Image (cartoon, rainbow, N blue to C red):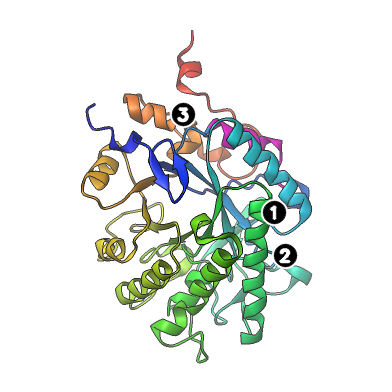
Amino acid sequence: MTDQTLFSPYLLGDIPLANRVVMAPMTRNRAAGGFVPGPLAADYYAQRASAGLIIAEAAQISQQGQGYQDTPGIYDADQVEGWRRVTGAVHEAGGRIFLQLWHVGRVSHAVLQPGGGPPVAPSAIRARAKTFVNNAFVDVSEPRALEIGELPGILDDYRRAAANAVAAGFDGVEVHAANGYLLDQFAKDGANQRTDAYGGSIENRARLMLEAAEAVSREIGAGRTGVRISPVTPSNGVSTSDAQPLFEHIVEGLDALRLVYLHVVEGATGGPRDIAPFDYGALRKRFKNAYIANNGFDLALAEAHLAADAADLIAFGRPFIANPDLVERLRTGAPLAALDQATLYGGGAEGYTTYPALAAATRP
């Protein structure tokens, strides 16, 4: 191999990265009691610290923001302490790590919500989606529409969660505004039929996402704040009639905040890249800082993207689960281990921290 662009260092704001490989955030449903990440999480992320940047799995910013069983939080002291063990292990291994901040909105179930109430959403439209509760996939619950007076409290939850993440030792945070969760729901007209200042026009529907990004960046600094978007993904039953102008407006707003990166799911999350026409180059041109491209990348496509200046960093998701040393395997052309689907969500160490690095896997 002669083209090693993927493996060259990169300066993310003032954060030096060893390479341009990003470990994408992936929910694994292994939090302990109180939604605290346990010791296994520290091992799991430390094993993958050779990534230039790890974006840790989404952590709910409040109980209301939870959508699946056994996902970690970042809203109380015990959760902060649990995450501190994770960041310490990653930093000791030489890695860099951000935390993804999550509010699922309507993609939840009443058994997870405060007082057993309905999930919240921009409009009372049930998602065509399932969630994971009581060790099974079930239909999400019918949501209620958020009152406009509740939105400042949600923005405060994002702000506090960001402060907690920094207190836990994270190098920064990523605001999860993708995949049909709350901020994406507000932005897309298939989920948002409001008639107030947060509905109707592109400017109104984009408002909450931009306000959340601003609240976080004001709390911890724009140089420690990224945002993830997914313009055309149908994940969790979300859709919009105006993806191109909507997300060009959103990205212009995010760029004005001088955020350190924009993380874009190109195509359907975990699915085809060409699911719908969309000009990602238009987003790239509108955002001055780092552009992270995500979805369906192998080494050849990653190198092609970087060579064409279509991205600065490339995010890999599921390949990192079964290949803790994915960077080295990509660098050397070594074969990738297969993922065990049965251990993807929930459980203990098996299928979580038990995948061996290449040297251990080939040792006689």
Q: Which residue is label 1 attached to?
A: 134
Q: Position of residue 32 (x, y in %)?
A: 74, 45
Comparing labels 2 and 3, the label whose residue is closer to the camera: 3
In the image shown, does 221 or 164 lie closer to the viewer? Answer: 221
Residues packed near mark 2 inside 10 Å, few (<14), some (14 to 19) or many (20 plus) = some
Whole-percent x and y of residue 298? 32, 39
- Kindly indicate whether the residue at mark 2 contacts the one at mark 1 (C-beta within 8 angstroms): yes
Q: Which residue is mark 2?
A: 111
Sequence order check: which comes first, mark 2 or mark 3?
2
**Which element is circle 3 on?**
loop
Left or right of 64 in this view: 240? left
Q: Residue at x 27, y 58 (%)?
A: 274
Q: Secondary structure at mark 2?
A: helix
The range drawn in magenta is 35-47
Q: Amino acid at mark 2?
A: Val
Residue located beneath label 3 in the image: 325
Give above or below for 197 relative to 48: below
User: Quarter-wise, where is residue 234 in the image?
Assistant: bottom left
Which is nearer the eye, 238 or 75? 75
Residue 258 drawn above or below residue 190: above
Q: Quadrant of residue 221?
A: bottom right
Q: Residue at x 40, y 87 (%)?
A: 201
Among the 4 quarters of the image, the one containing residue 106: bottom right
Task: Residue 351: give x, y in percent of width and height.
Answer: 57, 33
Instruction: Answer yes or no: is residue 56 visible.
Output: yes
